[in-house]
Amino acid sequence: MSWFKRPNSNFEPDENGEPNGDSNQDFNAESTFAPVSDDASAGQTKVRTEGLWIKCPGCRNPLFKAELEANLYVCPKCGYHFKIGARQRIDLLLEPGYSLVCGNLRSTDPLNFFDVKSYKKRLSDAQSQTGLNDAIVTALGNIGPHPVVLSAMEYAFIGGSMGAVVGECIARAIDRSLASRHPLIIVSASGGARMMEGVVSLMQLAKIATGLAQLDQARIPYICLLTDPTTGGVTASFAMLGDLNIAEPGALIGFAGPRVIEQTIRQKLPEGFQRSEFLLEHGFLDAVVPRSDLKPYLIRALDFMNVKSPSHPAG
Ligand SMILES: [Zn+2]
């Protein structure tokens, strides 16, 4: 019940002078409100509420998970946009009947990398947790009447980091767009390049940017949807190269993190720095679109971009 405590400002230090308030609460942790034993031998009526509630990081209210899910994982009280997975994103945007492609590629750990644990172990852990082979899922399907190629990044897979597999999947998605002339949409959610693959991950930036230049020459629309968080090498490359760059409200978008910038330039950054609304105000984004409006917004954008329409001369 730690999340029913008062806000952190009211904590009192213990005898060691250490704050005993839960100032480092894990906002993503599931609620453990009134957990009840599963012991069937007790023979008493049990009410199991564990995991049914989640605390909103935006307004700190407890939210009923089923209600949150019905509201597309947006807080009904304050509009905070929770992170969602790649498959949920695809389900949200595409019509039923889409097909998944490019899911069988796996990283080969080219540097045989080891930090506190081996990269191979990190990969196998992430694979068993997410059910994906790497941090991206590509789907072919329709948004409204428009056939599209949609790639969505999975933040739960090693922070959505971009290694050789993510780069290759995006390159193949670009190739599919070029071959079919269907618009490409990439939903980014990433901490940046995958350091465990070193220069191999950085090479993906050039490979993807070259492919996107070909899309541009072929006059095929490319739309970037930036979600929380989109940082590092992903922001510095394909996430900002769209014909249309849009973001969800409140998403962290930037190259280096705010703390690193503050320490480097030794200045206090303005409030809301590197959030979607700030970037929109300063001309880095074309629109900030709430999750519930994303699909109709994308359909309107694709309607507008459709050069085959007789009322719009191709050129
Ligand atoms: Zn909230």
Image (cartoon, rainbow, N blue to C red):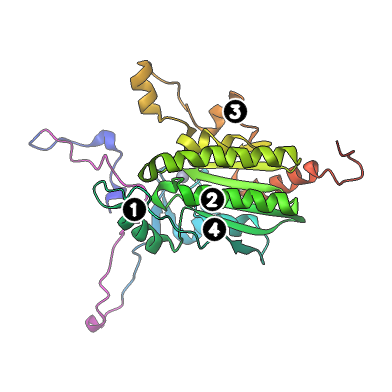
Residue 88 numbered tag? 4
Q: Earlier in the sequence, mark 2 or mark 1?
A: 1
Depth check, front residue: 144 or 14 = 144
Determine the CA span between mark 2 and mark 1.
33 Å
Residue 168 numbered tag? 2
Residue 29 numbered tag? 1
How packed is label 2: few (under 14 Cα within 10 Å), some, or many (20 or more)?
some
* Image quadrant where one finds the N terminus: bottom left
Per the image, the residue denoted by label 3 is: 284
Residue 199 visible in the displayed image = yes
How packed is label 4: few (under 14 Cα within 10 Å), some, or many (20 or more)?
few
Determine the CA span between mark 3 and mark 1.
33 Å
Determine the CA span between mark 2 and mark 4.
22 Å
The stretch in magenta equals: 17-45
In magenta segment, residue 30: yes
Query: What amino acid does circle 2 point to?
Result: Glu
Tag 3–tag 2 contact (CB < 8 Å) = no
Q: Is residue 98 above or below residue 264?
A: below
Q: Earlier in the sequence, mark 3 or mark 4?
A: 4
Q: Earlier in the sequence, mark 3 or mark 1?
A: 1
Query: Could you say where residue 112 lies in the image, as x and y percent from the top left?
Result: 31, 50
Query: What amino acid does circle 3 point to?
Result: Phe
In magenta segment, residue 53: no
- SS class, disc 4: helix
Query: What amino acid does circle 4 point to?
Result: Gln
Q: Residue furthest right?
A: 310
